[in-house]
Image: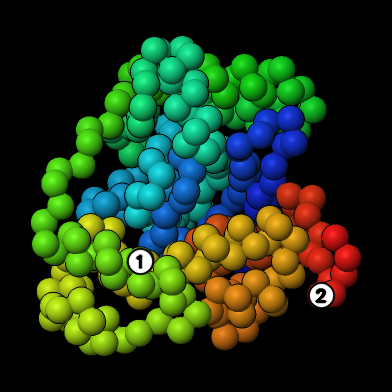
Amino acid sequence: MASGERARYWRYPELPGVDLLHAHYVRKAFARHTHETFVFAAITDGVEAFHYRDALVHAGPGQIALVNPDTPHTGHAGVPEGWTYRTIYPDAELIRSIAADTLALRGDVGFTEPVVDDPYAAQLVIGVHRAAEEGNALAADSLLRLVTARMLRSHGGRTTPPAPRSAGARDAARARAVLEERMVDPPTLERLAADLGTSPFALLRAFREAYGMPPHTWLTDARVRRARRLLDAGTAPAEAAVAVGFTDQPHLNRHFVRSVGVPPGAYQRSRGVGPRRRGART
């Protein structure tokens, strides 16, 4: 990590379904990626700039960057001194349960704006972190529910069901399924398009429209996401790298840091998971 930069990615056992990141970045640049969870990022110093769908947006002190699951975005410094933030990553099921409990919203929910100017809500996100650091489970859980309800009430709600799929969208979904199945040995774009009965350019265009990134970028993101699940299960980083299709651990390290913000080994250690030795009894 660049000099002066720092990051801690961790999980508080008494706050299940939530990851936490406290970081200061200057030269760090997140590649276009997605999360399976929601993202609430409270900026405490500096400015973060990030591409959200097709727009470049900025978040500064007192503001919260809000990202829905499976939504492509990037991240980099918006000012020379970089940015500092405290981020919570609550899983979708937890957010749905809070929405149902506090606002009587049933089904899928999400947020409508990528940046919210709400200093009080930002303090609630920071409070979740501080409560977790102090081992105060009651406060951490309470503050998480308060900020989620506040954000949903003012900047979110029920998500609309997707429109019927076009032929291009169906091809994109089929291509995604193939890439998921053949993650370690994916076909070329030309071969993939031919197997689906379309042209490479038409598939490329349809895939970008459906998932916000071209197939090769989506595949890298999917590999990192699968590697995270393997690391959570105790797989050593070197073994996880090969299992998801990266050539070696340095290849995984490079892409993992560009998506998650910390190296895979640090990510695994911070979550209290030790890598299993091959052949060890479970």
Graded by Cα atoms within 10 Å as few (under 14), some (14 to 19) or many (20 or more), the crowding at tag 1 reads few
In the displayed structure, would residue 149 be above or below residue 7? above
Residue 264 locus on image (x, y percent): 66, 65
Determine if residue 119 is in view. no
Label 1 element class: helix
Q: Position of residue 158 (x, y in %)?
A: 30, 26
- Please tell me whether residue 17 is drawn above or below residue 137 in the rendered image: below
Q: Name the residue under label 1.
A: 177
Label 1 and label 2: CA atoms lie apart by: 30 Å
Q: Is mark 2 on a helix, strand or loop?
A: loop
* Residue drawn where x is 79% and y is 65% of the image: 275
Earlier sequence position, callout 1 versus callout 2: 1
Residue 103 lies left or right of residue 209; in this view the side is right
Image quadrant containing the N terminus: bottom right
x%, y% of residue 246? Answer: 55, 80
Looking at the picture, does residue 252 appear above or below residue 257? below
* Label 2, residues with CA under 10 Å away: few <14, some 14-19, many ≥20: few
Q: What residue type is labelled 2?
A: Arg
Residue 224 visible in the current orientation: yes
Q: Which of 265 and 109 is in front in this view?
A: 109
Asked where in the image residue 241 lies, by quadrant, the reply is bottom right
Residue with the mark numbered 2: 278
What amino acid type should be assigned to the residue bearing mark 1? Ala
Q: Is residue 197 left or right of residue 23?
A: left
Colour mapping? rainbow
Residue lying at 47% horizontally and 48% vertically, measured from the top left: 36
